[in-house]
Every structure is written in C-alpha cells, then in structure tokens.
Image (tube, coloured by chain):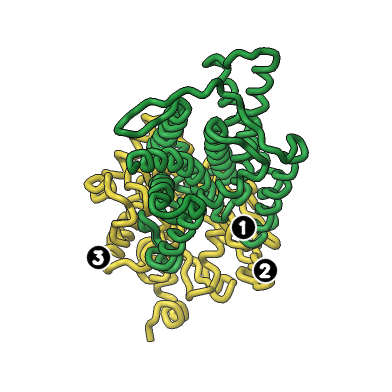
Chain colours: A green, B yellow
Amino acid sequence: MIQQLILNGIIAGSIYALIALGFTIIYRTVKFFHFAHGVVYTAGAYLTYSVFSYLLSGTSNQLSVIGWGIAILIGIVGAGVLGIFIDRFIYHPLRRQKASNLTFLLASFGVFIFLQNLIQLIYGAQILTIRTGPIKEGHQIFNAVITDIQILILFVSCWLLVVLWLFIQRTKLGKAMRAVADDPIAANVVGINPERIILTSFAIGSALAGAAGILISFETNIEPTMGFNALLKGIIASIVGGIGSIPGAMFGGFFLGIAENLGIWKIQAGWKDCIAFAILIVFLLLRPGGIWGVKTEKERL
Amino acid sequence: MLLEVINLTVYYGTVQALNNISLFVNEGEIVALIGPNGSGKSTALNAICGVLRSLDGEIKSGKIVFMGETINGMLPHDLVKKGLCIVPEGRRIFPTMTILENLEMGGYIVNDKKTIKGTMEKVFHLFSVLKERRKQKAGTLSSGEQQMLAIGRALMLQPKLLLLDEPSLGLSPNYVEVVFEKTKEINKDGTSILLVEQNARMALEICHRGYVFKIGEIAFEDKAKNLLENDEVRKSFLGEI
C-alpha cells in the first residue's frame, strides 16, 4: 500500500514539478504571479487532444509512436507560442506603461478567465478523453503497479526537468536568464536585452506548463477548468520549495505530490487538496523561505 | 572628443535633478565628477549610459554625443556595443552566480570564445583575487572583492569609455586604495574613464580634470591640480578649513 502511494505521489509530483518550474522561470524574470500559467496548461492538453483526434479520425487503430510524438510536440510548442502571445499582447504593453504589480496580477487573472472561456466555447464544457488505446494491466515493481502511460509521464517529465536544469546552468542563454533574475539592471548594463529574456522565459515556462497538461491528459479526462487546480498546486509547490528557486520548484513539486498521496493513507481521499493547503500554511508561517530557504525581500534589505 | 554632454536637463517625475549641465571627456582621460550627495553626479552617469529610464528619470533637453553619434534615449544593451560601459553604484554583481559566470556575463555580447578567454586572462591579471576564487558564488565575496568583480565584469566588454559610479563607497580603506590604483592602471591601458566619487580628494589626485557638482549644476570645472588648489573648492568640497 505505502509503496503504491509513494509511486502515485512521485507521478503526481513530477507533473506538479513541471508546472512549478515553468511558473518559477517566468516569476524570476517578471517578478509577478503569472496566473494565466494555469490556462496555458489547459491549452496544451486541448491542443494535443485536437491533434490526437485528427490523426485518429477514420481509423480505429492505435496511434504510432510518430503520431504520439507529433501530438505531444505540437501541444508543447503551441503552449510556448501561447505564452509568447500573452506576454507580447498583454504584459508587454503594461510594462511600457510602467504598470504596478497589482495591475499585472489582475491582467493575468483576466487572461486566465478569457482563455478558459474561449476553450469552453470551442470544445464545450463537457469532459473529453484522449483515446490512448486499450487499458492494459500495469507492471509490478516494488509491490506497486505502474502502467505504461505512467512510465511515459514519469520519463518525459523527469527528462524535461533534467534538460531544463542543464539549460539554465550551462548555456549562455540560461545564464543570462539567471543574471536577469539576480539583477535586471545589472544584466542590462552588461548588454543583455531584458525583453528578449522575458520572452524566452515565457516561451520556456509556458512550454513546460503545456507539457504538464498534455501528460496528465493521457492519464485522466480533460475539461476546460482543469487549469485552476493545477495552477494552485504549481504555486504551492513553488512556495513550499522556495519561491524563485529552480531546484526548489522541482523539489517542491515532488514533495507536494508525495505528501498529498501519503496523506490519503490515513485520511479520506476527498481531503487531498486540503493537505496541499495545510502544507502551504505551515510553510508560510514557519518557513516562508521554503525548503530551499530563499531569502525573502525583507531579509535581503 | 570621446564623450560630450551638451546642456543636459534631467527630471525624475516633477523633480529636477540636473539643470543644463555640459561636460566632456577626451580620449585617454580620467575625468572625475565630485560634489555632495544628491548633487546629480550619478544622475549624469545614468543618463549617459541609458539606465536613467529604468530609474524613472527623463532627459528633458540637451544632447549626449559619444564618438560623434547622438546617443540620447539609447538603451544600455545597445550602448555597450558601442564601447560605453558602466560599473553601477552598489556594484550590482550577480550574487547567485559564480565569479566565472559573472565575468562570462560581462562578455555576453562578445561571440568569439577566444576573445572572451583572452579578456578574462587580462582581468585575472589585473585582479588576481578573482582568479583564485573563480568558482565561488559572487554573493559570498567581501564588498571590496565584489567591487573588483564589478569592474572586471565591465572590462570584459573592453570598453572605450568606462563609467565608474561611486566605486569606493562602502569599502574598507585598504580596498579604497586598491580601487584608485586599479582605476589608474586601467586608464594607462588605454581606457578613458568618467568617475563619480564621494571621496573627492582621492578622485582629484588620480584624475586629469574634474567637475564639481552643486545641486544639479556644475559649480567648477578645471584641471584636477587647479581644483585641489582652489580655495573655495577646498573649503566647500574637500572639507578643509
């Protein structure tokens, strides 16, 4: 039992980690909570759903590996492009007007609601399912059961986390993103164009949200409102990990996933979301810097 | 003339920070801007290097000419490509990145890896402490070492004109000496320098010419030697009785 709960927690955690990482990458450069991140997650899932349905139309066969690859890739790239659009058409004009953080917050809520309703208008409010093929029995490992789809989720998300980590640590563009996160004015005076870095962050962060939405849609049904809960979990994971910290966001995601699932060992499953919020409150009160112990603005002064 | 500022007036919102100032820097010179706190020295530097807009300031009138080209309103990331580079007040190194990464970021716009490596060797030669600690996070350095890093980072761009904003502020007396020595050395290697300093006496001792600021205007301008001997400057700005 406990092995199964931990495994489920790791799988859920890998999704949370992807959302939190995307959220954190964007937060670090723009320094406000980009709530519309949640709807980008939904959009990624729906885009992949469309590609899947299109490729499957007329056949009753399963999709080939190439078909899977195309559907996932279009979903991820589409989510990245959506992120760029949100920044260019909403946040960029606000930045030029030197809008306050509150304005950005409200704008990002507005984008969230608008796009969620747009998705509902196009696809309808009902639950949709991506036909991933016949349900097969899972594999036994360490007294726990894991399905092929879950292995795919775990593999893809962990691969993305590692690739992103290496990108940010090793590449010139990744380092420039860290420089802007550290001090935007200093980054500007060494020749880094902050607008370019902001755009890159939105592209990468949103692609990660899209990837998370796509992966979860192979496991469960999708609906237009799915982004809200995912966004909350992503934000909680970011805060618990240490807001603005990249390893913190990854670690926070796994921590939250495992804690939620271990929680329902003793408590009813309906209380799962409650566990996440309880953890958030405990951290905010006792360790606001998160697991990674980032310094809050106050401490920095 | 490398840099020429003509009749510059700057406002922060409705507050005037600079009133119709003019100054210039010749090739090969060290020029110092001195004067009390809030007299507009740093504002002048920020206007020249393009940071002003990020600080909510605005050039109301006047002209800034660098190497024959008007650069008013250009942004910092475009100006560094022209060879104009600032070491900002308070050092502003990237604290979570290593010294090596800080220097790499200094050479962000340089695409040739060999050039970057060569320049970095020069920087390490100038500031050997940076080489010893190159893997260390920059936030863990002392303020003096951070200042060395900030200057080193700016040198990675091999600027024609280096702007230094209060480089000795908050440093131990030892490092204040080092900063002024290194400033002279950098200048000898062919980089022109425009220096803003609280420490007026030391600044005037290493520079060729100086401008004395007073509430947004230039009160005196002369060769450094003459300013050091000027009675009024000595009384009002060098703290002598």
Report which residue position mark 2 lands on.
Answer: B13
Binning the other alpha carbons within 10 Å of mark 2 as few (below 14), some (14 to 19) or many (20 upward) gives few
Report which residue position mark 1 lands on.
Answer: B53
Binning the other alpha carbons within 10 Å of mark 3 as few (below 14), some (14 to 19) or many (20 upward) gives few
Q: Which residue shows up at 58% across the image and 20% down it?
A: A70
Asked if badge 2 and badge 1 are on a common chain, one would say yes
In x, y percent, where is residue A79?
61, 35
Q: Which residue shows up at 42% across the image and 26% down it?
A: A138
* Mark 3 belongs to chain: B
**Image position of A273 (left or right of A248):** right
Relative depth, front residue between A135 and B239 = A135
Q: Which residue shows up at 52% across the image and 74% down it?
A: B38
**Quarter of the image that includes the C terminus of chain A:** bottom left
Vertical position of residue B143 compared to residue A206: above or below: below
Numbered circle sitting on residue B174: 3
In x, y percent, where is residue A38?
60, 46
